Amino acid sequence: MKHSPALIKLSALALACALPFAASAADGISYNYVQGNYVYTNTNSGNADGWGLNGSVAVHPNVHIFGNYANQTIKGSSVDFDQWRVGVGYNKPISPKTDLVANVAYDKLNAGGGVKVDGYSVEGGVRASLAPKLEGYAMLGYEDGKNYNGDVYGRLGGQVKFNQSWGVAADVKIANGGDTQWMVGPRLTF
């Protein structure tokens, strides 16, 4: 499937139109955090692992900017690759402890041998405070781009909170093509 600038513009327009009807984030959920990760990827062509960083900053009660970076090495080789993701998200409470979330992002992958993939992703789902020290989310997304065939994916994640600032978060992304990526690490919420 070809890269569609119209889809990106339509998603941005939908987010902008929804802003006047927004409220603040659901109770117990913060879009201000930084997290370090151990990252593991399982693909049809091999497995890889490494480290990553991700974070988010609320720029409005209903809008947040987020970014992810991961560096992994393919098992049994010296080939490594970098993954970048930068985007903007919209969150709207649908109950006192649950947000509806929509994200649009620019995605980039650089691998050994000069392999470069640029693209975008859009995703939507829910994020909820399940208990005072437990949060979870479920997202359904689509990613596409130059030199890449589009793919549908699902992401599940959660965070166990030790206190208001510290916790451990985990995320699993399962793509329709069979690739699976896990991330787990400490999170600092501010």
Image: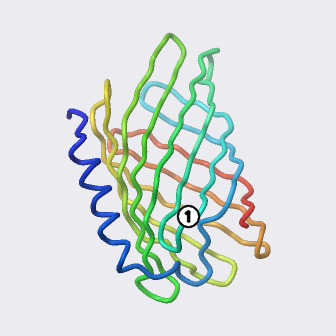
Dividing the picture into quadrants, the one containing residue 100 is bottom left
Q: Write the residue at 38% across / 40% down.
A: 178
Q: Where is residue 113 in the image (x, y as percent from the top left)?
A: 50, 10
Q: Quadrant of the N terminus?
A: top left
Query: Could you say which is closer to the camera, residue 169 or residue 82?
Result: 82
Which residue is at 28% across, 38% downward? 150
Residue 40, compared with residue 61, is above or below; it is: above
Residue 32, above or below 47: below
Image x and y of residue 126, in percent: 43, 71
Q: Return the residue found at the far top.
A: 113
Q: Image point 62% across, 83% down: which residue?
A: 131
Residue labelled with disc 1: 59
Left or right for 2, reference 31: left
Is 187 displayed left or right of 124 in the figure?
right
> Label 1 amino acid?
Val
Image vertical order of residue 172 relative to residue 114, above or below: below
Q: Please report the residue visible at 40 percent of the width from the left and 83 percent of the height from the top.
A: 94
Give the x, y percent position of residue 165.
77, 70
Q: Would you identify the image quadrant in which residue 79 lies?
A: top right
Left of 139 or right of it: where is 181?
right
* Residue at the far bottom in the pictured view: 96
Q: The C terminus appears in which quarter of the rendering?
A: bottom right
Judge whether 2 appears above or below 128 on screen: above
* Tally of numbered tags: 1
Q: Residues within 10 Å of mark 1 (few under 14, many from 20)?
A: few
Q: Which residue lies furthest to the front in this view?
A: 20
Image position, residue 170 (x, y; %): 62, 57
| Colour scheme | rainbow
